[in-house]
Amino acid sequence: MNLEYGFETRAIHAGAAPDPTTGARATPIYQTTAYVFDDVDHAASLFNLHNFGYIYSRLTNPTVAVLEERIAALEGGRAAVAAASGHAAQFLTFFTLMEPGDEFVASRNLYGGSLTQFGLSFKKLGWTCHFVDPSEPENFRKALTARCKAIFIENLANPGGVVVDIERVAAIAHAAGIPLIVDNTLATPYLCRPIEHGADIVVHSTTKFLSGHGNALGGVVVESGKFDWSQGDRFPSLTAPEPAYHGLKFFENFGDFAFTMKARAVALRDFGPALAPLNAFLTITGVETLHVRMERHVENARKVAEFLSGRDEVAWVSYAGLKQSPYYKLAQKYLPKGAGAVFTFGITGGYEAGIRLVENVRLFSHLANIGDTRSLILHPASTTHRQLTDEQRADAGAGADVIRLSIGLETADDLIRDLDQALGS
Ligand SMILES: *Cc1c(COP(=O)(O)O)cnc(C)c1O
């Protein structure tokens, strides 16, 4: 779809057209595992990647394809591949970049699950992640080694409300000849488009604000199409002959969408975390109202954050949309429409008070998710971040006194009243 269309138009139309057979206007759920070949030559051309088409839904599916094209259009990327979850999307990304023994540098302010995926599970594949404090971009440069194949950040970090200086980190990655990967889950492309600031790959957990209704897991990887994978011989997976496809060289053949092709044709094919067509449909439906929802998410979050800042039971509020935040300036630059709707605050009284609060709210739901129409509350130290050490928890902004909120689309005054009564109880 023409990238000159506005964001809102792309959110509703990109990648989709009326169904050619029935005229169905909404994208149908193509609930099929496989597709009939025209003839043997057609089948051969599909299997050899000489032609694009549908073979089997582990690789491609028409409903999933609409979502892929739509997210690529919203991010200003060249192409995208969807996955069963955000974590699956991250796995596909790293599997496509890394060889055994390779390394990468990541922000230490990440979603708790990403800290364990990178720090523990990836280790078993022979991949080493070096975590650094992202508030000083030079930390990324200092941690780079000759075997580093990428830098990974969350531009708006979960749960700490940390905004990373994407342009400075991108410059450091590019000086080293490696791509910058940005997890844009919390900001969504409505609030920030990392590719415009130098990111090469954007990953999402579409489970959150993109689907937006807390009803469908999913993930997506978007490539900018601008990275030169041939520099420095660092990415044999993209430049060397691929034995599974008769020696095909992905970068030589597919150029600016080689990464997506490789992630799909090898990582998705061989490991299998494909997005279900129903989940793609639910996510497409969510994305169509992304711009309207994010405006209200941000407005409600600002009101709740301001209310909390004035309470005695609250020691601090870490929301980059508040003037007192150390990240306010960066947020003005990278998130001019608002600093998202997920933030943390510190409760005086620590661990016990945190548990009391999550047990006394009535309208907020106590659960481990974000980016729902409903407002959500979590005490990370006793839930999502409980497997981490005290030090890792503190580093990730998830200490004993920390409460995380994901502000939904309810009446802001109702949310404030609920927190008011729970803080006082
Ligand atoms: C939830 C989340 C993930 C993981 O996504 P899943 O869809 O749960 O696998 C990754 N990064 C961020 C920032 C998240 O919020």
Image (cartoon, grey):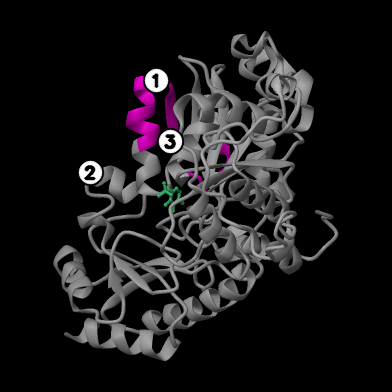
Sequence-wise, the earlier of marks 1 and 2 is: 1
Checking the image for residue 131, the label placed there is 3
| Magenta region, residue range | 117-138
Q: Give the residue at the far left of this rendering.
A: 352
Quadrant in which the C terminus is drawn? bottom left
- The answer as to whether callout 2 falls within 8 Å of ligand 1 is no
Q: Could you tell me the amino acid type at mark 3?
A: Phe
Sequence-wise, the earlier of marks 1 and 3 is: 1
- The answer as to whether callout 3 falls within 8 Å of ligand 1 is no
Q: Is residue 307 visible?
A: yes
Pick the front one: 145 or 78:
78
Helix, strand or loop for disc 3? strand
Helix, strand or loop for disc 2? loop
Q: Position of residue 230 (x, y in %)?
A: 74, 18
Checking the image for residue 88, the label placed there is none
Helix, strand or loop for disc 1? helix
Is 186 a magenta residue? Answer: no
**Mark 2 — residue?**
387
Q: Is residue 205 visible?
A: no
Q: In percent of the image, x 32 and y 30: which residue is there?
A: 120
Q: Could you tell me the amino acid type at mark 2?
A: Gln
**Mark 1 — residue?**
125
